[in-house]
Amino acid sequence: MNKKGFIFDLDGVIVDTAKYHFLAWKKLANDLGIDFSEKQNEELKGVSRVKSLEKILDWGKTTVPEAVFTELMAKKNNDYLKYIEKMDQDEILADVPKVLDFLKDEQQPFALGSASKNARAILEKVALIEDFKSIVDGTDVSKAKPDPEVFLIAAKELKIVPENCIVFEDSVAGVQAANAANMISIGIGEKETLKEADYIFKDFTEISTAFIKELIEK
Ligand code: B16
Ligand code: MG
């Protein structure tokens, strides 16, 4: 039987936590007197917490001492966690269970490859934590996407060579990371934004189980 390694990003692929990141970053930015738009939030997708705060301070042409930077990161995360706390299975994005269930039926192992340090907490909230053979998140890596580290660790844990791995990603940095890892990249989102991906779908409702089967048998 063919075995492929399927690797899923979290935010924007399994659940939409971008809206909660937005609310928490907006509050923090506005408290500092910095404007923060939804368009800017798009630029933070897939970007680590540290890099996100650096970008917001840059946009506001502001710098803060290191100790304040650390405090701001903690403050944002505390606000974000309040939103996470209320999450449940209803927040799993449409047709994601269809694909995960199909992979289980086909005995294909799958992993999570996320930049978020809150990934395990979120998977628990939406009751998917037991389904992933491996979970690699922001606490496991030293280099952020577009570096391929997160996906290479996931492949190793799945015991599948990178060339036989397939990554689902909603961010440009994540697609670049998958490509740099020599994996098949599947962009979830807009064609114009994710043009570097091998395949692009608006969301999982556009992905058929026949297509997944083709990937397995490739
Ligand atoms: P945290 P992903 C990413 O998740 C988010 O897209 C990004 O907006 C966030 O800054 C990053 O996780 C870090 O999240 O603050 O929870 O550690 O798309 O890689 O699953
Ligand atoms: Mg994402």
Image: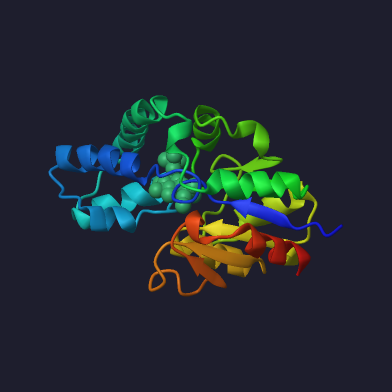
Q: Is residue 154 above or below residue 192?
A: above
Residue 81 visible in this rendered orientation of the protein? yes
Location of residue 192 (image quadrant): bottom left
Q: Position of residue 180 (x, y in %)?
A: 61, 68
- The image quadrant where one finds the N terminus is bottom right
Q: Residue at x 32, y 43 (%)?
A: 19
Q: Nearer the viewer, residue 102 or 27?
A: 102
- Left or right position of 169 against 24: right
Q: Nearer the viewer, residue 205 or 85?
A: 205
Q: Is residue 131 above or below residue 163?
A: above
- Left or right position of 112 against 51: right
Q: Residue at x 12, y 43 (%)?
A: 33
- The image quadrant where one finds the C terminus is bottom right
Q: Position of residue 138 (x, y in %)?
A: 53, 43
- Left or right position of 37 against 88: left
Q: Position of residue 78 (x, y in %)?
A: 35, 28
Q: Residue at x 49, y 55 (%)?
A: 205
Residue 114 visible in this rendered orientation of the protein? no
Q: Residue at x 45, y 64 (%)?
A: 172
Q: Is residue 213 above or below residue 51?
A: below
Q: How many marks?
A: 0
Residue that extends furthest to the right in the rendered view of this protein: 1
Tell me, what colour scheme is on the image?
A: rainbow
Q: Position of residue 9 (x, y in %)?
A: 54, 51
Q: Nearer the viewer, residue 146 or 32?
A: 146
